[in-house]
Image: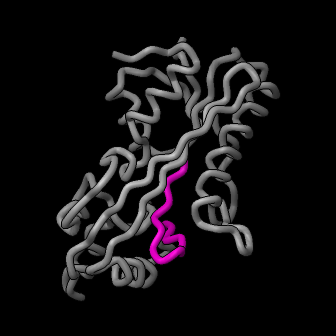
């Protein structure tokens, strides 16, 4: 039986857990209609990302009870790109992707990935904050990148592990945090649940 539940639909988080050698089972509510995890009015971006990770983990704990599943740790995460205090989420369409990438062009932004783990009724939390600097992007750069389809399911409209990595001039922090699951912080939280990694 896998040692943990993962409360996330992200294939990248699943890949990174596999990289750690952590088997897992998905524990998810039915997909919601409308945008994922809306930001509350006046909510600071750094609070938003932690709240959404926490809510995913606590929702997972409720589902575990409702479905009468085995009591295992539940891991959740949320990744947010923040520029000048604004949350730059997943683009809704091509125009939105072009707008987001235009804002990131030639600037430095933060990528926050918040983690929440529920185990035996206790909530453990952590957050990884990484600074990423983009080179200047031309309209042609942005258009060609949008043509690849890569921006559309990713916070900030880019994937650092894919073609979007060519835009990154400098990074200070966790590469895997920008991907969506910071391995250092993940291993620390799993250790609190008794899952010791090499």
Q: Quadrant of the C terminus?
A: top left
Left or right position of 107 against 52: left
Image x and y of residue 166, in percent: 17, 65
Whether 89 is among the magenta residues is: yes
Question: Which colour assignment does the render follow?
Answer: one colour
Decide if residue 106 is in sight here: yes
Identify whether 86 is placed above or below 181.
below
Assign the N terminus to one quadrant of the image: top right
Report the span colored magenta: 78-90
Side (left or right) of 83 relative to 31: left
Q: Is 160 covered by the magenta stretch? A: no
**Residue positioned 45% across, 63% down in the render:** 155
Q: Can you give x and y, in whole percent of width and height, for residue 197 in the image?
A: 39, 17
Main structural element of the magenta stretch: helix, strand or loop?
A: strand
Q: Is residue 83 above or below residue 128?
A: below
Quarter of the figure with residue 72: top right
Q: Residue furthest front?
A: 172
Q: Of all residues shown, which one is farthest toward the right? A: 66
The residue that appears at 20% across and 86% down in the rendered structure is 138
Query: 123 above or below 155?
Result: above
């Amino acid at each position: 039986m896998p040692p943990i539940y993962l409360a996330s639909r992200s294939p990248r988080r699943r890949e990174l857990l596999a990289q750690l050698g952590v088997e897992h089972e998905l524990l998810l509510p039915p997909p919601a209609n409308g945008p994922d995890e809306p930001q509350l009015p006046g909510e600071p971006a750094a609070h938003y990302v932690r709240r959404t990770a926490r809510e995913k983990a606590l929702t997972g704990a409720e589902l575990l009870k409702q479905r009468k599943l085995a009591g295992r740790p539940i891991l959740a995460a949320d990744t947010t790109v923040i520029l000048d205090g604004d949350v730059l989420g997943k683009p809704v369409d091509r125009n939105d992707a072009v707008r987001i990438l235009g804002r990131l062009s030639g600037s430095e932004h933060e990528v926050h990935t918040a983690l929440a783990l529920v185990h035996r009724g206790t909530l453990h939390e952590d957050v990884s904050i990484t600074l990423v600097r983009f080179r200047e992007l031309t309209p042609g750069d942005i258009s060609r990148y949008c043509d690849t389809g890569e921006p559309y399911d990713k916070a900030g409209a880019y994937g650092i592990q894919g073609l979007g990595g060519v835009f990154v001039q400098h990074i200070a922090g966790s590469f895997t945090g920008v991907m969506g699951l910071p391995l250092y912080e993940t291993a620390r939280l799993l250790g609190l649940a008794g899952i010791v990694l090499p």
